[in-house]
Image: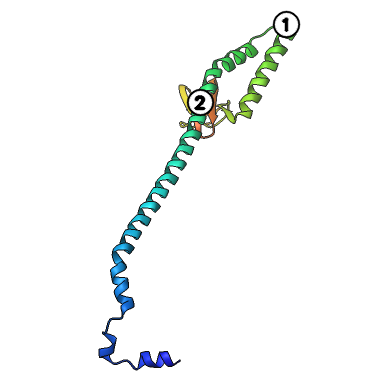
Amino acid sequence: MAKKKKEEELTPEEETVETPVEETVEEGNPWEEKYNAEHDSYLRLAADYDNFRKRSLKEKEQSYGHGKADAIEKLLPVYDNLERALNQETADEAYKKGVEMTMTQLVSIFEGLGVEIFGNVGDTFDPNIHNAVMHTEDENAEENTITQVFQKGFKLGEKIVRFAMVQVAN
């Protein structure tokens, strides 16, 4: 408490007198500035590295997604041919059963990879995922309804691998 009373009792002349502690702080300012500059440089380098790491991880994930989409796109002709084979009439039940099993297996593989198959008759036309190649006037169908599907569409996550080719009623 004695120190507090002495500080409060200082006259204005005594307040302006510099102490040796203040002189050492002023002399240390160039070192403090250099330390702060080095510290800022270190923080920037750490932030740059963190950004690089995040960008590299994102690019790696995207390249995997693009490669997966490319592989699926290469398999789509096989799906189309199996679908055509299923739509053909045949007297050989063993042949038909084999094609059905192959198609079922291919669809389950697509589902396992996260592929969504879309474009069914009766769906509402969406220009973001459907490609309308024909229009028809059909009084039985509602406006912008898919009346015929020429090729199914495939979507991997948010990426459209192939648009569905459809006929739309107006």
Amino acid type at circle 1 is: Asp
| Residue with the most extreme right position | 94
Under circle 1, the secondary element is loop
Residue labelled with disc 2: 67
Residue labelled with disc 1: 92
The answer to whether any part of residue 80 appears in the image is: yes
Which one is earlier in the sequence, the residue at label 1 or at label 2?
A: 2
* Up-down relation of residue 31 to residue 115 (above or below): below
The number of discs equals 2
Is 2 left, or right, of 33 in this rendering? right
Q: Position of residue 17 (x, y in %)?
A: 27, 84
**Residue at image x 32%, y 71%?**
25
* Up-down relation of residue 126 to residue 42 (above or below): above
Q: Dividing the picture into quarters, in which one does residue 141 lie?
A: top right
**Residue at image x 67%, y 13%?**
99
Spatial CA span between label 1 and label 2 = 38 Å
Q: Position of residue 10 (x, y in %)?
A: 32, 91
Q: Position of residue 144 (x, y in %)?
A: 49, 30
**Residue at image x 60%, y 29%?**
113
**Residue at image x 45%, y 37%?**
56
Is 52 left, or right, of 101 in this rendering? left
Q: Where does the N terminus fall, quadrant-wise?
A: bottom left
